Structures are given as C-alpha cells and as structure tokens.
Amino acid sequence: MAEHRVSGVQKNADLCFVCGDHNPYGLNARFYDLENGEVVAVFTAKKEHQSYPGRVHGGVIAAILDEATGRAICHLDGPDSFGVTVELSIRYRKPVPYDTELKCVGRITRNTRLLFEAEGEVLLPDGTVAASAHAKYMKMDIHSISEEGLDESQWRYLDEPVPDSISF
C-alpha cells in the first residue's frame, strides 16, 4: 500500500445514496481529490447494504463505482462539473465485506468537449481490487441535471477535517 497526498475535498449532497450525509440508508462516502489526478471515496457499507450475509450487494458496488468514476471530472473541471452516466461496465472480482472501511478510486481516461470516460476500482483494506469499472458520461453542470435544481444546503462542502493523505 502507498500513501496518496490529498489535494482537495469534494462536495457532498444531503440525500444522495452514495454521498448523502443526511441519508440514513446510504453509504455516506467522502470524496477526496488526490495530487496524482485521481479521486478517492472513503466509505463503509452497512449490513443493510448486503446481498448475501457478509457481502455487499453488487448494485451498491455499482453505485460507488459510478459515483467515483463520475466525480473524477470534478477534480479536472471544477467542483460543479458532473456527468450523466451513458455506460457503466463492471467486473466483480472478490466479495466486498460490509462494516469495513473501503476505498473506491476513479480517474479520467478520455475527456472531450461533451463526453468523458473514466475507470475505477473498489479496493479491499489490503489493497486487493474487489471490483473494477469503465464508464462513459455526458458532461453536465451539477445544477442543471435535476429540474428541481440544487441549493447550498443540498450540494456543499462538509465542515469536517480533511486528511493529508490516504493509504491504498
């Protein structure tokens, strides 16, 4: 495992399943920009996220991979840059435990004016890749994705300490 320097923190939504800090059913993930251009999510799936006993549901794994790869554009184009998923391909490799802190890393692999592509991995505590994904997104500003829009209470920086580095 290596230490990766954190260069910034990303915004959280209030009720998002993946990053929502007010969603009692969600993953409550925290997203950090890394100096190497990647984005990392730190999260702990709960027993309520299981498929089989001891294993996180594959749909929950898909959700964190979709979010982490999609958020890689925020690191590149700014905090309100986002994308709408066009394609998501996942390869499940190992069972993912709940009640264990996990990491999900995302990075841009192709960036054009209208679309971007990204790849990422869910990492077990020992650094083993549990699942990997490749995704394609249509670029959109976060505030224009929903017809309802977002206000500052729904899309904001959390008042929490930011780590200097993250190991994976």
Image: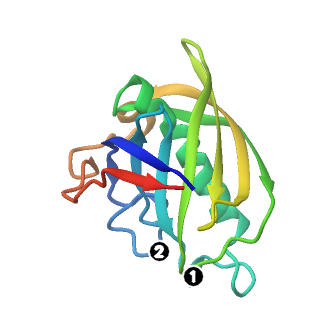
Mark 2: few/some/many CA within 10 Å (<14, 14-19, 20+): some
Position of residue 80 measured from the top left corner of the image (x, y, whole percent):
35, 32
Q: Which residue is drawn at 32% across and 46% down?
A: 11
Position of residue 96 measured from the top left corner of the image (x, y, whole percent):
68, 71
Q: Which colour scheme is used?
A: rainbow
Q: In which quarter of the image is the C terminus?
A: bottom right
Q: What residue type is labelled 1?
A: Glu
- As helix, strand or loop, the secondary structure at mark 2 comes to loop
- Across the whole image, how many numbered discs are drawn on residues? 2
Position of residue 22 measured from the top left corner of the image (x, y, whole percent):
32, 67
- As helix, strand or loop, the secondary structure at mark 1 comes to helix
Q: In which quarter of the image is the N terminus?
A: bottom right
**Does 138 sit above or below residue 97?**
above
Say the numbered circle drawn on residue 125: none
Q: Residue at x 37, y 51 (%)?
A: 165
Report which residue position mark 1 lands on.
48
Mark 1 vs mark 2: which is more N-terminal? 2
Q: Which residue is drawn at 63% across and 66% down?
A: 126
Report which residue position mark 2 lands on.
25
Q: Quadrant of residue 92?
A: bottom right
Mark 1: few/some/many CA within 10 Å (<14, 14-19, 20+): few
Q: Which of 129 and 86 is in front in this view?
A: 129
Extreme residue toward the bottom, this view: 53
Q: Which amino acid does label 2 sit on?
A: Tyr
Q: Which of 4 and 64 is in front in this view?
A: 4
- Taking the image as shown, residue 99 lies to the left or right of residue 90, namely left
**Does 38 sit above or below residue 23?**
above
Position of residue 83 measured from the top left corner of the image (x, y, whole percent):
52, 32
**Does 41 sit above or below residue 84?**
below
